[in-house]
């Protein structure tokens, strides 16, 4: 996949069109992090999935909401009961005190971690989408955005904060847009523009000559 598929993707072109040629890509809205109390309103059942008293799992969910580096191995010393989701695959014998963690539990915890990280994405996208709510007809408006979560004081406060950061400035003119595109494409477009301008007088002269002959 890395050798034959990914190199074929026009990622450089896509980043250039977005204004990130030779620059690290970022989303302005990701600089505004929803408060944890608001994030907990999205998929609120996740923290209790492995038991309401599972402190280890709750702490893991908090780590995911903080977007801790997933390459850091989590501390599993606090996990001491069967059915607790951990990042290991221990085997237990009949007379052993070692706990057996099923692959299903491990896979489930991984999927739930993904959903936890999706909380902030959903909230950020919703706040951005609802900025244009008045301009969108009811037929085009997502039913999901009608949920009470997106009318709560916590969300409205977050939306106001995010909009203050993400609101766009004046629209860039065509020359400014060209400088943010892939240089090769920008250079090619500018060459076409220069060529068109240089040929314009000749074309006008030919049209006048043709018009004179038709008369």
Image (cartoon, rainbow, N blue to C red):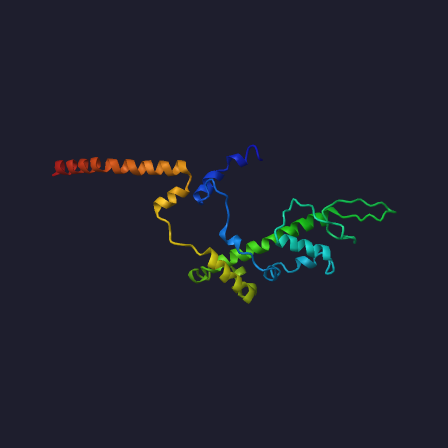
Between 91 and 20, the residue placed more toward the observer is 20
- Where the C terminus falls, by quadrant? top left
Question: Farthest residue in the right direction?
Answer: 95
Can residue 140 be seen? no
How many marks the image carries: the answer is: 0
In the rendered image, the vertical position of residue 9 relative to residue 113, given as above or below: above
Task: Please give the name of the residue rendered at 21% of the width and 36% of the height, measured from the top-left corner.
Answer: 203
In the rendered image, the vertical position of residue 6 relative to residue 19, given as above or below: above
Residue 115, x across and y down, in percent? 62, 53
- Where the N terminus falls, by quadrant? top right
- Residue 191: which quarter of the image? top left
Between 136 and 98, the residue placed more toward the observer is 98
Task: Please give the name of the residue rendered at 52% of the width and 55% of the height, measured from the top-left corner.
Answer: 125
Task: Please give the name of the residue rendered at 35% of the width and 48% of the height, measured from the top-left corner.
Answer: 173
Residue 178, x across and y down, in percent? 38, 42
- Residue 49: which quarter of the image? bottom right
Can residue 179 be seen? yes
Task: Please give the name of the residue rendered at 21% of the width and 37% of the height, measured from the top-left corner.
Answer: 201
In the rendered image, the vertical position of residue 198 relative to residue 159, given as above or below: above
Question: Farthest residue in the left direction?
Answer: 215
């Amino acid at each position: 996949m890395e050798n034959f598929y990914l190199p074929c993707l026009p990622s450089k072109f896509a980043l250039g069109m977005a204004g990130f040629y030779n620059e690290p890509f970022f989303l302005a809205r990701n600089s505004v992090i929803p408060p944890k109390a608001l994030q907990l309103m999205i998929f609120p059942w996740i923290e209790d999935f492995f038991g309401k008293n599972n402190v280890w799992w709750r702490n893991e969910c908090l780590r995911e909401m903080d977007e801790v580096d997933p390459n850091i191995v989590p501390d599993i010393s606090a996990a001491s009961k069967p059915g607790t989701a951990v990042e290991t695959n221990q085997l237990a014998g009949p007379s052993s005190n070692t706990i057996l963690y099923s692959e299903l539990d491990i896979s489930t915890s991984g999927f739930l971690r993904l959903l936890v990280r999706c909380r902030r994405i959903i909230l950020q996208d919703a706040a951005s989408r609802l900025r244009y709510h008045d301009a969108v007809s009811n037929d085009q408006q997502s039913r999901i955005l009608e949920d009470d979560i997106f009318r709560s004081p916590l969300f409205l406060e977050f939306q106001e904060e995010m909009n203050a950061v993400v609101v766009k400035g004046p629209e860039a003119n065509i020359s400014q847009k060209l400088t943010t595109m892939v240089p090769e494409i920008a250079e090619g477009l500018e060459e076409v523009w220069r060529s068109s301008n240089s040929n314009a007088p000749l074309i006008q002269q030919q049209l006048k000559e043709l018009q004179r002959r038709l008369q």
